[in-house]
Amino acid sequence: MTRMRALFGLILLYSVCVQAAYDANEVVLGASEKVVLKQFPAAHCAPLQWKSKAAERRCDDSKIVLGGVPGRITFYLKRDRVEAFDVRFDTKDADRMAAFLKTRYGPPAEETRANLEARGPLYKVEWKKGQERAVLTSQGEKRRASLTVWRGDFEDEIYRVR
């Protein structure tokens, strides 16, 4: 019986750890640029080409496979810490990506499917943990869907004109 309890405890601990942070291939929000480059050695990191309170640098990598879905990723850093990342992938893979993220990030706070007259079907899934957010968005008429993960006011500040 004690072995069974120990096994159950490990499974419970693992499931909590898996859902503890939003990540992309083990790079979590708050990770350093060094960690980004270790996981994505082909990433090109450079200062942002515009002034922003949200980030100072970005690291672009042409390829990522997340949950079996191929795509492209960009990390945004401020004071050598990942503040956000954006994964772009084919719209046709949105359901598969959402299914993977539900196992990785836990149950979503919101999930919406709508048919917009002018733009076609819209699929949006959102996760929330404290100041951290993850949003998967897919519009049927567009070629690319996206997963954007951030903390704090990144989403409001990144493209604000200064």
Image: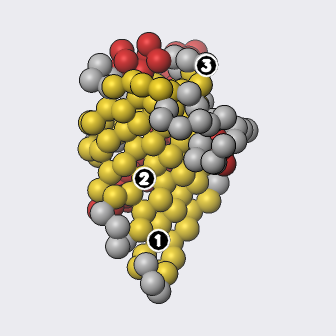
Q: Is label 3 in a helix, a strand or a loop?
A: loop
Residue that appears at 51% across and 76% down:
114
Residue found farthest to the bottom: 117
Q: Could you say where residue 94 lies in the image, as x and y percent from the top left?
A: 37, 58
Compared to residue 3, the image places residue 137 above or below, namely below
Residue that appears at 42% across and 25% down:
46
Chosen colour scheme: secondary structure
Q: CA distance from mark 3 to mark 1?
A: 35 Å
Identity, as a three-letter code, of the amino acid under mark 2: Ser
Q: Quadrant of the rendered structure where residue 144 is?
A: bottom left
Q: Which mark is residue 122?
A: 1
Q: Earlier in the sequence, mark 1 or mark 2?
A: 1
State the quadrant of the N terminus. top right
Q: Is label 2 in a helix, a strand or a loop?
A: strand
Which residue carries the number 2 mark?
Answer: 146
Q: Could you say where residue 88 lies in the image, as x and y percent from the top left?
A: 37, 48
Compared to residue 56, the image places residue 158 above or below, namely below
Neighbour tally class for label 1: few under 14, some 14-19, many 20 plus, Cα within 10 Å: some
Q: Could you say where residue 37 lies in the image, as x and y percent from the top left?
A: 37, 18
Residue that appears at 58% across and 31% down:
55
State the quadrant of the C terminus. top right
Q: Earlier in the sequence, mark 2 or mark 3?
A: 3
Q: How many marks?
A: 3
Which residue carries the number 3 mark?
Answer: 79
Q: Is residue 132 left or right of residue 63?
A: right
Q: Are marks 3 and 1 in contact (CB under 8 Å)?
A: no
Q: Earlier in the sequence, mark 3 or mark 1?
A: 3
Q: CA distance from mark 1 to mark 2?
A: 12 Å
In the image, 139 versus 8, the foreground residue is 139
Neighbour tally class for label 2: few under 14, some 14-19, many 20 plus, Cα within 10 Å: many
